Image (tube, rainbow, N blue to C red):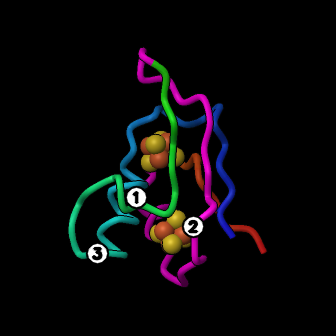
Amino acid sequence: MVKVNLDACSGCKRCMLACSFYRTGGFNTRFSSIKIYTDLGHRPVAFSLDACTDCKEHYCVEFCTLRALEVYS
Ligand code: SF4
Ligand code: SF4
């Protein structure tokens, strides 16, 4: 499964774009299994992984340049 470190996260939502591409072939954060919620200043305040299927590629982790995501077992 994927673990999120909000302290390291910038709120860029690249992980959400990557997951939506994995799931749908398109870039739309609405269809991402990982959700990073930001406040009005675009700062990350919460996340959810409720719909994550733990895909073996872990695209969300690959696309997080800040290494705010990691895989754990
Ligand atoms: S890609 Fe990384 S830094 Fe950007 S929103 Fe996702 S977890 Fe945060
Ligand atoms: S592990 Fe796969 S399914 Fe889960 S959020 Fe990341 S890209 Fe989406």
Image coords of residue 29 (percent x, y): 34, 52
**Amino acid of disc 1:** Phe
Which numbered marker is on residue 51? 2
Question: Residue 17: x, y in percent?
Answer: 33, 56
Label 3 within 8 A of ligand 2 by Cβ: no
Which of marks 1 and 3 precedes in the sequence? 3
Q: Is residue 4 above or below residue 27?
A: above
Quadrant housing the C terminus: bottom right
Q: Disc 1 marks which residue?
A: 63
Q: Are marks 3 and 2 in contact (CB under 8 Å)?
A: no
Ligand 2 within 8 Å of disc 2? The answer is: yes
**Where is 61 relative to 53, above or below?**
above
The residue type indicated by label 2 comes to: Ala
> Tag 3's secondary structure?
helix
Q: CA distance from mark 3 to mark 1?
A: 17 Å
Name the residue beneath numbered marker 3. 24
- Mark nearer the viewer, 3 or 1: 3
The Cα–Cα distance between marks 3 and 2, rounded to whole angstroms, is: 14 Å
Dominant SS of magenta comes to: loop
Q: Could you classify mark 2 by the number of other residues whose Cα lies within 10 Å: few (under 14), some (14-19), or many (20 or more)?
A: few
Is 58 contained in the magenta span? yes
- At 69% from the left and 56% from the top, the residue drawn is 3
Disc number placed over residue 37 in the picture, else none = none
Front label number (2 vs 1): 2
Q: Secondary structure at mark 1?
A: loop
